[in-house]
Image: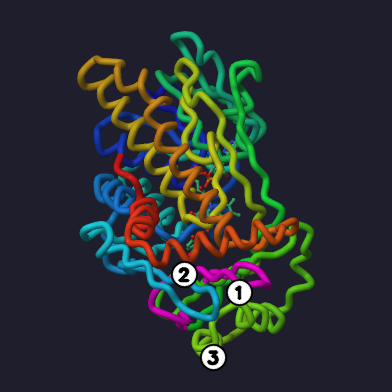
Amino acid sequence: MRTQVAIIGSGPSGLLLGQLLTEAGIENVILDRVGKDYILGRVRAGVLEEGTVNLMDQAKAGARMHAEGLPHDGFSLAFDGRDHRIDLFGLTRGKRVVVYGQTELTRDLMDHREKSGALTIYDAADVQPHEFNGRFPCVTYNKDGTTHRIDCDFIAGCDGFHGASRKAVPENSLRAFEKVYPFGWLGILADVPPVSHELIYANHPRGFALCSMRSQTRSRYYIQCPLDEKIENWGDDRFWAELRRRLPTHHADAVITAPSFEKSIAPLRSFVSEPMRFGRLFLVGDAAHIVPPTGAKGLNLAASDVYYLFGGLIEHYQDRSNAGIDAYSERALSRVWKAVRFSWSMTRMMHRFPDTSDFDQKIQEAELDYLTHSQAAATALAENYVGLPY
Ligand code: FAD
Ligand code: DHB
């Protein structure tokens, strides 16, 4: 088989790139090692920046997101038993975010891909990119007991942190930067109305908590937990009680509980691998970088990578210029590092670290106090939260 762009990974980055390419008349095939239902069963991000929303529109997949997504003009930082609202809309001259689950965004992109007739190969085993330093790259995979091969012009490695694309690059061609945080997030989904109409990021002596949502009737709650915490130890009653303890009283009293239907623990990590381009192989999204979820940036960074790569591929095919492709890694990394910095600073400011000294604790309190009393500091936070320009 031959295509123009072989895309490894059917997560948000692979699907968004695929849909933009298909709309632009550029042939592409997506391969994933697992099936559609498995991908749609993963519960992950929930906050979309304006740039991500615009890309969904450009991919002609934004209709349901506009109908069902919840525009948010602000969020609350809760500490010292009080709420401190960050007015995103006012501080950024009219920008906002949209709360819409990654699962729904993925479903929309899959549905549109199916309608467009573009090919996705699910349950493809041993997917491997080859010959990307030459002019004739290809991707091989196993399915139904046979090895298949797709020849292509370019390979987009959209296969997440544990994917095959970054692993196919010789180690001495990559430089990795990493920070592992000494805690995780225990998250649940439950069909109850959210405690507040805006998100609440809480810093409490017992640890961080986040009140988010998927809709007016579905809530997503997280609490900071030790890295070695076992999910079996967290029955719903224990989770609800711990969440309430970490919220200001008026919110704690307003939490409505019900049995959760999803519960998982995610470790927190910052990771960047440079560069993001190796000849005709491009790393995109989590394949190249991971951020701790505190700033809600992971999915949005995957989208901005897609923006730069799509622009480069369009220039290649329509204008016969490789300038955009050549600039991909530098452009993407420049935005990635700013989001890595923001996610790290939000994580540092909102969590309780096991080894915190009295000095560190005072610095954290001063930072929160500064942020909630200085318009300049709040503006910087808001500007990063809604997403820096592409
Ligand atoms: P992925 O979504 O990881 O998609 C990669 C795809 O590649 C998958 O479908 C996978 O099956 C496929 N794949 C992997 N290996 C191979 C292979 N060898 N061959 C073929 N296919 C392969 N971000 C936030 O902003 N907020 C959050 O709350 C949040 N929570 C998260 C919780 C978890 C547990 C994780 C892992 C991430 C979370 N993120 C969150 C980050 C966000 O979900 C990711 O940044 C986003 O999914 C990145 O999209 P992606 O398409 O680059 O990668
Ligand atoms: C969600 C996750 C985040 O990491 C975040 O900062 C905000 C919201 C969520 O899953 O809804």
Q: Nearer the viewer, mark 2 or mark 1?
A: 2
Question: Which quadrant of the figure has residue 143?
Answer: top right
Q: Nearer the viewer, mark 3 or mark 1?
A: 3
> Do the residues bearing badges 3 and 1 touch, measured as CB atoms within 8 Å?
no
Q: Which mark is residue 154?
A: none
Q: Which mark is residue 253?
A: 3
Placement of the C terminus among the 4 image quadrants: top left
Compare residues 308 and 14 and report the one nearer the observer.
308
What residue did someone put label 1 on? 261
Amino acid type of the residue tagged 1 in the rendering: Phe
Q: Earlier in the sequence, mark 3 or mark 1?
A: 3
Q: Which mark is residue 77?
A: 2
Given the current orientation, which residue lies at the most extreme top position?
Answer: 134
Q: Tell me which secondary structure the magenta stretch mostly adopts.
A: loop
* Image spot of residue 253 (x, y percent): 54, 90
Q: Secondary structure at mark 1?
A: strand
In-image side of 207 versus 305 (left or right):
right
* Image spot of residue 113 (x, y percent): 36, 46
Compare residues 154 and 224 and report the one nearer the observer.
224
Amino acid type of the residue tagged 3 in the rendering: Asp
The magenta segment = 193-210
In-image side of 312 versus 274 (left or right):
left
In the displayed structure, 282 sits above or below 303; it is: above
Residue in view at x 59 percent, y 45 percent: 34
Q: Earlier in the sequence, mark 3 or mark 2?
A: 2
* Image spot of residue 56 (x, y percent): 30, 50
Looking at the image, what colour scheme do you see? rainbow
In the displayed structure, 273 sits above or below 348; it is: above
C-alpha separation, residue under disc 2 versus residue under disc 1: 27 Å
Question: Which quadrant of the figure has residue 120?
Answer: top left
Residue in view at x 64 percent, y 35 percent: 125
Q: Secondary structure at mark 3?
A: helix
